[in-house]
Image: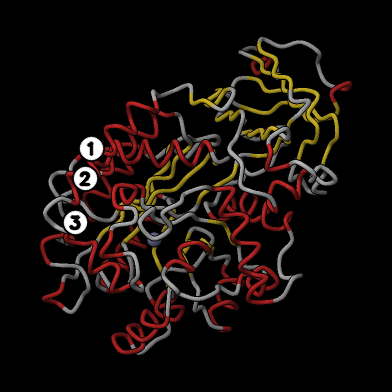
Amino acid sequence: MQAQATGKTLLIRNARILVTMNESREEIPDGALYIRNNVIEQVGQTADLPQDADEIIDARHHIVLPGLINTHHHMYQSLTRAIPSAQNGELFNWLTKLYPIWAGLTPEMIQVSTLTAMAELILSGCTTSSDHLYIYPNQTRLDDSLEAAARIGMRFHGARGAMSVGQSKGGLPPDRVVQDEAAILKDTQRLIETYHDHQRHAMQRIVVAPCSPFSVSRELMREAADLARHYGVSLHTHLAENVNDIAYSREKFNMSPAEYAEDCGWVGHDVWHAHCVQLDAHGIDLFARTGTGVAHCPCSNMRLASGIAPIRKMLDAGVPVGLGVDGSASNDSAHMLGEVRQAMLLQRVGFGPDAMTARQALEVATLGGAKVLNRDDIGALKPGMSADVVMFDTRQIAFAGALHDPVAALVFCTPANVDCSIINGRVIVREGQLTSIELGAVLERHNQLSLALAQGVD
Ligand SMILES: [Zn+2]
């Protein structure tokens, strides 16, 4: 341990309440955290921890909790929120309206929209995010997203998406936005070899992620699984999102989406699927047995009227479930704490008032997300975990009158923004402001690019 005893130390103390998400789900009043470099060294009551550090943050008015984890997103879609022609359709209709607009994406658009999406996530309590980029027109690359993540300082799982079956072959996307399958696999391999960090506390991982069963071939699904397993990286795609998705799978493959996933090698601890709104009992059992994860995206499911995912059943069966805000065009609001709230509310609409508690929803967004991303170093505040910590100020109007139970208030009341966020030991938000980028300038450019992208198409 001698070698670890050097480096910058950060002490967060006097927390009004500190939510650990440890094995006993302990919540510590007057809690404190002692961080060295990028790792949590001690957690406990303020009086029991060191009294000094290189930097001290007083959290006497704050709820302190593990950074939230977003397991599904398409950050480039932040450029196409609330597009008039795509406001009121279901999934396939919505995609058909948007594909031609997205065909105009440029590398700068990917970079600026990723920064914007990450800023929104970080301010709303998220410290780790996945992003599923599956459309690569005009020399855009996943490298553009990875650069943005490094610039803002977010822990990032970049999913190399892909579409290869265009309209002429019976797929949904127009031919001009699909790619050759050999080129897809080659680029994915390049990304893994260039960027993937296997080590604990990694800030950057690569995920192999063909877009969906209705936009790539069975061969690509299988080869993608082989590639991911060769390198020991995770797999991600969309699955069983709505009833049309089920009908497509039945018609094209004569299988349910879960059967198709199993047939292609897409089950296991290293796989997670977005949505699974229509996952049947067999699918839930299969996912539980194999440790296959689900990214639940309640706002997107409501926005596109996809249905209510059976999350209560999945959790009871032992399926790993995390939360995702999904692409900004099908959610339009990428507020991570807001998504936690919607997850709780939507389960209640579907399955009764005891279907999900506030604390269960927070657990899905922390420990659940970590499990889905196949990580054991994030999602809880414990010694040895990555120093990803968020703090919410209880003095805001949203919490007025709700301090009987500040932790539940976080989920029941109006979704708040963080006052402070620490990612990998680095203070990324201080007094509600991002420290790593000039947000105003980024948003101004984002809005220019957004209008340019939609112009002439919509
Ligand atoms: Zn999605």
Real-space Cα separation, disc 3 to disc 2, in angstroms: 11 Å
Residue that badge 3 annotates? 101
Q: Residue 420: x and y, percent? A: 61, 28
Image quadrant where one finds the N terminus: top right
Q: What amino acid does circle 2 point to?
A: Leu
Q: Residue at x 72, y 75 (%)?
A: 352
Nearest the viewer among 405 and 244 is: 405
Q: Which residue is mark 2?
A: 451
Residue at 66% x, 39% y is: 66
* SS under mark 1: helix
- Amino acid on which disc 3 is placed: Ile
In what quadrant of the picture does the C terminus appear?
Answer: bottom left
Can you give x and y, in whole percent of width and height, for residue 144 in the image? 27, 38
Q: Quadrant of residue 141?
A: top left
Above-or-below relation of 66 to 286: above
x%, y% of residue 272?
Answer: 48, 61
- Residue that protrudes farthest toward the right in the picture: 47
Q: Quadrant of residue 439?
A: top left
